[in-house]
Image (cartoon, rainbow, N blue to C red):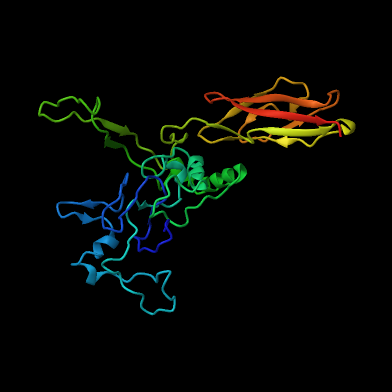
Amino acid sequence: MGDGGIAVYDNGFYDAGVRSCAGLQADGVQGPCDDLGLGATIGPQNLPLSNSRFFQRPENIAQAPPIATRPDESPLLANPQPLQIDERVNVDGTFKTPGLRNIELTAPYFHNGGALTLRQVVDFYNRGGDFHNQNLDPDIQPLNLTTTEKSALVAFLKAFTDERVRYERAPFDHPELFLSNGAPLDNNSVFNDGSGRAVQSTKHIPAVGRGGRQVADSNFLDPPPILAVQPGSITFTAKLLNLGTLPGQALQITNQGGGTLSWSATNSKPWLSLSFASGTAPSSPVVSVNPVGLVVGIFTDTITITAPDCSPVTVPVTLNITLF
């Protein structure tokens, strides 16, 4: 676990550090937890949602199913130790981990909708989650991925999309549907239907034949493009007595949101140039400098990258010319 301990857990449920959860303490008191997830109980008898915790109850312990060999047990054991009534179980703050099929189409992500795009999901795992809980799964570690590796991973995840599902083609087509869609107005007031109940809204979903849609339905909230540029700054060094062509340095311009991102770049100094100054993300324009005609000193300029509906990103560029 995140604290180095060993625990039994419900298969498929993990604490990825999405929210803070201290878990059950050594004194048996539940620590502060934003969302217990599988560790919660239901009903007047406070029955646990977790199988592990359910079978730890005194009336159920004798029926507990066999469990896998623990890390501190010999793998040669024919019969691993059964679940113990006082054994640590990792269920507080854990949630079902879904499969990857069609994950591109299922935003927002995590149990609380905390990530809108796949790039945000990759960033989350790259930093090792947001909370280092005691029940944190041991596989949640900082990954130190580069921008290129993150983009490649997002592309890999999108490869799990079935185009028949995206366009609702057979066998994923459907008849005309009428779905309950809550009640008009808001959480504080609704329309009375005359019987003391709220008037219900209905969402109409037209039939889709086996040929599917011509245009795919938009994803959740149709996320806007998000401009990202790496590196955050660029430095060149040249020698006055040996001014020649300096190697260029590439900018990585990516879209961390949805849709299409068209960008353009500008700068003000004639000694600085880009191999191309506009395009569609992802792009890798090369930044070049021409020190000819300059003297010893430090020269600066700023590349400003803009895109519609995005905050501009600036990249400071420094050219340092020395005598030798």
Residue furthest to the right in view is 241
Please report the residue visible at 35 percent of the width from the left and 37 percent of the height from the top. Answer: 207
Please name whichever residue, 173 or 186, is drawn nearer the observer in this view of the structure. 186
Residue furthest to the front in view is 27
From this viewpoint, is residue 211 visible? Answer: no
**Does residue 308 sit above or below 102 in this rendering?**
above
Please report the residue visible at 36 percent of the width from the left and 75 percent of the height from the top. Answer: 80
Residue 34, image x, y percentages = 32, 44
From the viewer's perspective, is 175 left or right of 46?
A: right
Residue 138, image x, y percentages = 45, 57
From the viewer's perspective, is 212 left or right of 235?
A: left
Residue furthest to the top in view is 268
Please report the residue visible at 54 percent of the width from the left and 44 percent of the height from the top. Answer: 154
Please name whichever residue, 27 or 89, is drawn nearer the observer in this view of the structure. 27
Residue 175, image x, y percentages = 33, 40
From this viewpoint, is residue 259 visible? Answer: yes
Please report the residue visible at 58 percent of the width from the left and 43 percent of the height from the top. Answer: 151
Image quarter in which the N terminus is found = bottom left
Please name whichever residue, 6 or 121, is drawn nearer the observer in this view of the structure. 6
The image quadrant that residue 189 belongs to is top left
Residue furthest to the left in view is 195
Residue 134, image x, y percentages = 39, 54
**Does residue 35 sit above or below 201 in this rendering?**
below
Image quarter in which the C terminus is found = top right
The image quadrant that residue 84 belongs to is bottom left
From the viewer's perspective, is 81 left or right of 43?
A: right
